[in-house]
Amino acid sequence: MLTSAGVVAVLDETGSVTFAASRGGLFPPRRTSDQTANPLVRTMLERRGEGGIVTRNDAHIRYSTGGTSNTLYGQAAWAGDRMIMMMVEEAAPWLSYSPPRDGTAMFGKMQVEEHPEPKTRTCEGCWLVKHPAQFDIGADVCKECAA
């Protein structure tokens, strides 16, 4: 099960997609699309017949438009003559730590005020430092001194 945006794909022995499904904001590769430009697929094709699982942190999806996805965490293994491949943007279950990559955030940086309101104020009557809630709006002395 994918816990973050990702793709599960089945490829044939030439590196072409026979099935793909996605989760999150990632689009799956088109059926029959050539994925041999993906470093994960290329490594799997070179190690064909050796068995085992291959893990790469520089995988990507090659789309039919010529573009590629963001860099993904990927893992693949052979099942007979089919390659089973899983790629995710973050939180890869097979890695102990796989944070989001730079530039993949859904939102930009948080807006910060230039001059935030002070966390404390000094009363001009008793000269004690107090929380702003202890002052009436616009008052220079605290509520205790004003009473």
Image: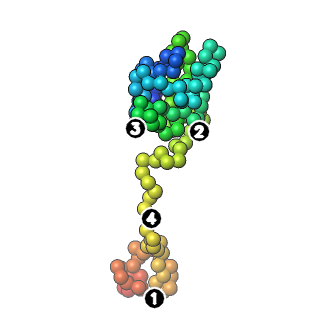
Q: Indicate which label's residue lies in the foreground, 2 or 3.
A: 3
Mark 1: which secondary structure?
Answer: loop
Q: Position of residue 123 (x, y in %)?
A: 46, 84
- Dot 4: few (<14), some (14–19), or many (≥20) neighbours within 10 Å? few
Identify the mark nearer the N-term, 1 or 2. 2
Residue under the point 54% across and 11% down: 80
Q: Which residue is mark 1?
A: 125
Report the Cα–Cα distance between label 1 and label 2.
Answer: 55 Å
Q: Look at the numbered disc 3 and give the secondary structure of its residue.
A: loop
Quick one: SS at disc 4?
Answer: loop
Residue under label 3, please give it.
25
- Above or below: residue 126 compared with residue 3: below
Disc 3 crowd, CA 10 A, few/some/many (<14, 14-19, 20+):
few
Q: Secondary structure at mark 2?
A: loop
Kind of residue indicated by mark 2:
Tyr
Q: Position of residue 74 (x, y in %)?
A: 54, 30
Task: Give residue 114's position: percent from left, percent from top.
Answer: 45, 71
State how far apart marks 2 and 3 are (Cα).
Answer: 21 Å
Mark 4 highlights which residue? Answer: 112
The residue most toward the front is 66
- The tag earlier along the polypeptide, 4 or 2, is 2
| Sequence-earlier tag: 2 or 3 | 3
Q: Residue furthest left?
A: 137
